[in-house]
Image: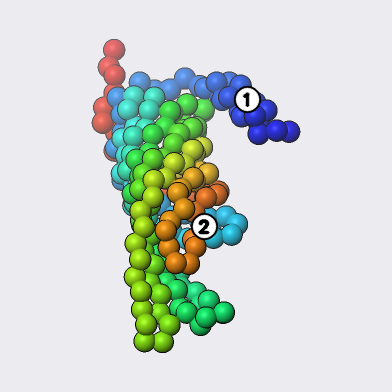
Amino acid sequence: MTARWRVTLLLAVLPGLAAPAQAQLGEVQVGVIGSQGLGQGGRRAPGLVVGLAGARLVYIGVRGTRDGETRTDAATSTVVTDHATLLALDLAAIIPAGPLEVMPGVSLGALRHDQHTAQGATTNDVRSTNFLVAPSLSAELHAGSVGLIPEVQYQFSGRPDLAYPVRRVGWLVSLRVVFVWEVGRVRT
């Protein structure tokens, strides 16, 4: 099955998931996020999220994460420490689907890489900032005033200009745990 066929199938199935929703004006979400990259270059990245879901139709939020790793280049005995800081705007459509809300969306932001290298007494610090685009699919489940939001993204980022390459393209799975405050309801 080709990628184009899978996307067409997904777009055909999503409207069928829609279910009636309560007339909510919106909700504010504040919480934490834990992310894990899959495959080569996968790292754990904890962070914070803040968002607003308007009328159960759209979600607009901000996420910030930071990860780090230290490794040694076997050929040169250079110790390389990498840190990546992400600040992104999240945009998503909300599709109520029974107890879940399915949210196809995209994250747009900046990914800053900091790399410190040390070989003996010689050290070097390099910084590089790249634009990031990450299409995503998430599902929100409420348990009282707590929301659990598992998410899968495919991140596209520019190649950072660093002495030791860092891979920043690929699948990322995340779990957001947020506290939810309802803004209001439509009264009839």
Residue hosting label 2: 167
Q: Residue furthest top?
A: 188
What's the residue type where badge 1 is placed? Thr
Q: Where is mark 1, residue-wise?
A: 8
Residue 181, quarter of the rendered image: top left
Q: Position of residue 27 (x, y in %)?
A: 31, 33
In the figure, residue 26 lies in which quadrant? top left
Tag 2, which secondary structure?
Answer: loop
Task: Give the quarter of the figure containing the N terminus.
Answer: top right
Say if 105 sits above or below 78 in the image.
above
Foreground of the two, 114 or 16: 114
Percent across and percent down for residue 146 are 38, 44
How far across and how far down the image is residue 159, in percent?
46, 53
* Quarter of the image where the C terminus is located: top left
- Which is nearer the N-term, disc 1 or disc 2? 1
Indicate which label's residue lies in the foreground, 1 or 2.
Answer: 2
